[in-house]
Amino acid sequence: MLATGRALKTVYETILALNLPHPLPVVCSNGALGVMCQPDDTQPNKVAVTRLFDTPVTKPVAERTITLAKEMGFLSQYYADDDIFADPTSEVDHQYVDLYKELTGANTICVENMMDILETKPLPSKQLVLFPKEDQDKTLEKFEQALSEPNLLIDGKRATLVRGYLGWFLEVLHPDVCKGNGLQQMCQKHLNVELDAVIAFGDGDNDLEFIQMAGLGIGMSNARPVIKDAADLVIEFTNDEDGVRKTLESMEEAGQLVLSATAQS
């Protein structure tokens, strides 16, 4: 299974490149969206997607995120279906659009007015607010205060805010959304796999619940301190050093990794 904080469209190339069993379960948008993916037999280099679950941001929270970002002079992004929307109005805004594409490979659809997107597209699986690194703490505090207003609470809970690990964005999610809950939904409701049988690898703050939920949570050597503290095991490799592959191969050689009949087919 692939699990990512990024949009679904950013993993298509990886799905096509990996020689993994299909259909492949994917949890994206930090756990808000769960799907099954496989190469599309009718269209070369395309991926066919079956949606399993979706836990979007509520409309009041989505609207307040858009307006507050504008009030602060920052750009927001809106993730709906397979697309990412934004309404850049300045050269700096467009620079952030380019920076995000450089980071994820995903194109952003630029529109005139984000409120039109809110009215015409499905509710967002997540939203991003993009800003200068020196403004991250201030922005996080401002959004914590604004989204704590009683009319914006969801079942009595404030929307989840995730600090971007690079320092120039934060994510807004439904309060029930995290990678760990996405993993739980996928395994228990759709794969019939016990969480004790799951191995999860992580490096960023948004992987905390993910590695805690799994039977074996593994931190990469470049993981954030909070991940290393929570992990059952911290390996010597980074994600850029093929740490996941090397660890799984070592576990298989040691007889610690047993694939199900489905995974072997």
Image (spheres, helix red, strand yellow):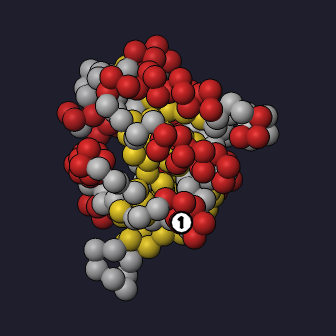
Tell which residue pokes out farthest to the bottom in this image.
Answer: 42
Image quarter (top left, top right, bottom left or bottom right) of the C terminus: bottom left
Query: In the image shown, does 11 or 98 lie closer to the viewer?
Result: 98
* Image x and y of residue 144, in percent: 59, 28
**Residue 244 to residue 236: above or below:** below
Residue 239 image-quadrant placement? top left
The residue at the point 33 percent across, 83 percent down is 43
The residue at the point 34 percent across, 53 percent down is 89
Query: In the image shown, does 161 or 200 lie closer to the viewer?
Result: 161
**Mark 1 crowdedness (10 Å alpha carbons): few <14, some 14-19, many ≥20:** few
Query: In the image shown, does 19 or 166 lie closer to the viewer?
Result: 166
* Image x and y of residue 230, in percent: 50, 18
* Image x and y of residue 134, in percent: 33, 23
The residue at the point 64 percent across, 35 percent down is 147
Which residue position holds label 1? 116
Query: In the image shown, does 92 or 79 lie closer to the viewer?
Result: 92
Residue 213 image-quadrant placement? top right
The residue at the point 30 percent across, 60 percent down is 107
**Residue 47 to residue 237: above or below:** below
Horizontal side, residue 128 vs residue 146: left or right: left
Horizontal side, residue 17 vs residue 27: left or right: left
Name the secondary structure under disc 1. Answer: helix
